[in-house]
Image: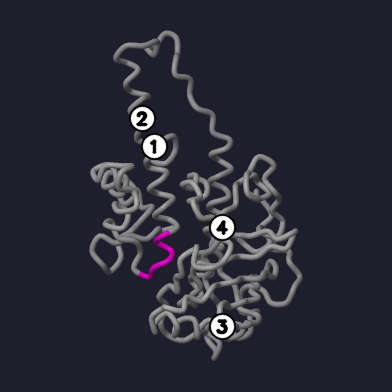
Amino acid sequence: MNYGMDYQGGGGFGGGFGGGFGGSNSGGGGFGDNYSPPNSGGGGGGGKARPSYDEQSCQPVTIRMILTSKSDPNGEGGGLLLEDGRKLYHVKLVAAVRSVEESSVNMMYQVEDGTGLLTVKQWINQDECSAMAELREQTKRDHIYVKVVGQVKDYDGQFMILAESIRPISNGNELTHHMLDVVYTAESAKRKSQYVAPQATMSGIGFQGGPMMRGPALSAAGMGSVGNPVSKAIEDYMQIESEKFENGISVAKIQAHFRGRFQEHEIRQVIDQLSGDGTIYTTGLDDHFKFAI
């Protein structure tokens, strides 16, 4: 997977972005997420069916990965594929702001992460609270690092992120963590694609049926998001939503989202499993969680 580290544009990691984190461009206080609903801007698809599990996943990416993505020949509505075949819907990236244009209805950012340059658009919610407006002001300075969460759009070969959240990052560790997350996620996807499921029937050791079949069945059910649509749906939803709020996502919000689809005990079981294996962690608020990676 080419993450774009051979990019020769202006700036680069490790202090090449105009002052890094220690100078006057390091970004002020207040690092809560500036979230506006995905359908608050134009172009929403009214009456659209419930999104697939892939559409609910949030891929950590570099700009180069977006710029080299291709149209999905089997997708509907302009789906995109990364070079390694992963579907591209929601993304998160960390980049430096190169320029900002503000109008009464939206903000247009040019951002660079050392692998390429990309446009990010965010609609302005006229009813937003003062804290959100103040946070948006903090993202308007050139060379400040921001974390962007949103959807990738392809307009005749011109890529853009329609942002749901843009916020300043707190320190350089977030940049390092993001790049590690990009590599980790890509390598994990590669290993999954190479995984060969064991045969359900094996001669000579009692796997031909009967009670012995319960072992593999229970094992598959406990594999988390692999082969378990309930776990995958909850995990993907938590991964997207927890990035939008500084204190993560609450259990109550998760239960409200999946009400009518999953039982509360099923949701709790998945959350306990993710917490137990270190995938998520509790934040400063009770029953609020964020992804560790």
Label 4 and label 2: CA atoms lie apart by: 29 Å
- State the CA–CA distance, disc 3 to disc 2: 55 Å
Q: Residues within 10 Å of mark 3 (few under 14, many from 20)?
A: few
Mark 4 is surrounded, within 10 Å at the Cα level, by few (under 14), some (14 to 19) or many (20 or more) other residues, namely: some
Left or right of residue 211: residue 207: right
Residue to which mark 2 is pinned: 219
The residue lying toward the viewer, choosing from 249 and 210, is: 249
Question: The disc labelled 2 sits on which kind of residue?
Answer: Ser
Indicate whether 139 appears above or below 41.
below
Determine the residue positioned at 41% across, 52% down: 237
The magenta stretch is 241-246
Q: Nearer the viewer, mark 3 or mark 2?
A: 3
Where is residue 25, by image quadrant? Answer: bottom right
Residue at the (56%, 84%) spot, across then down: 140
Q: Main secondary structure of the magenta part?
A: loop
Give the Cα separation between the discs numbered 4 and 1. 23 Å
Residue 175 image offset from top left, x and y in percent: 53, 70
Q: Amino acid under label 4? A: Val
Q: Which mark is residue 223?
A: 1
Give the alpha-carbon distance from disc 1 to disc 3, as whole Å.
48 Å
Where does label 4 land, which residue? Answer: 182
